[in-house]
Amino acid sequence: MTELETRKFKKILLARQSELEGLIRNREAATIETSADALDQIQHAVERELALETLARESNFLRETRSALHRIQTGIFGVCLDCEEDIRAKRLVAVPWAARCIACQERADRDGETPDDMIEPLLVDAA
């Protein structure tokens, strides 16, 4: 991968990181609201659950993005963490935070592995 391509991906990932950090900061929807009405309580609980699921998903996206930025910093961006082969450019264009090539990702999906199963020091600092 050329230096120019790496800078392009870094710019994309930094923008994504900034966007996700902004979304995660807004946690008002996850606050617990009390109400005397049972239907309102149920509605608030459902809304809170959806907000927490969204927060968890965005936090995971942020972890993946920070991990990709860490791989850029360490010079291993674009290399599959499992087989150590280059990740195809088409895949990186579609999913710049991809840590695995398509074959290894499909295997990981079949085996039920998650990004948290990958040991990377950045996960400690992630959201």
Image (tube, rainbow, N blue to C red):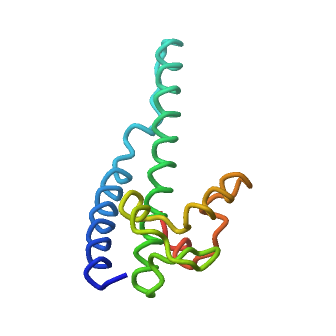
Residue 16 lies in quadrant = bottom left
Q: Residue at x 48, y 20 (%)?
A: 43
20 relative to 53, above or below: below
Q: Residue at x 49, y 71 (%)?
A: 87
Image quarter (top left, top right, bottom left or bottom right) of the N terminus: bottom left
Q: Nearer the viewer, residue 100 or 122?
A: 100
Q: Residue at x 32, y 78 (%)?
A: 6
Q: Nearer the viewer, residue 91 or 34?
A: 91
Give how far across and how far down residue 81 sits, in percent.
Answer: 59, 75
Answer left or right for 117 relative to 3. right
35 relative to 4, above or below: above
Answer left or right for 37 relative to 14. right
30 relative to 47, above or below: below
Q: How many marks?
A: 0
Give how far across and how far down residue 86 sits, in percent.
Answer: 50, 77
Q: Residue furthest right?
A: 111
Give how far across and how far down residue 95 sits, in percent.
Answer: 42, 59
Q: Residue at x 29, y 62 (%)?
A: 18
Q: Nearer the viewer, residue 69 or 18?
A: 69
Give how far across and how far down residue 64 sits, in percent.
Answer: 48, 64
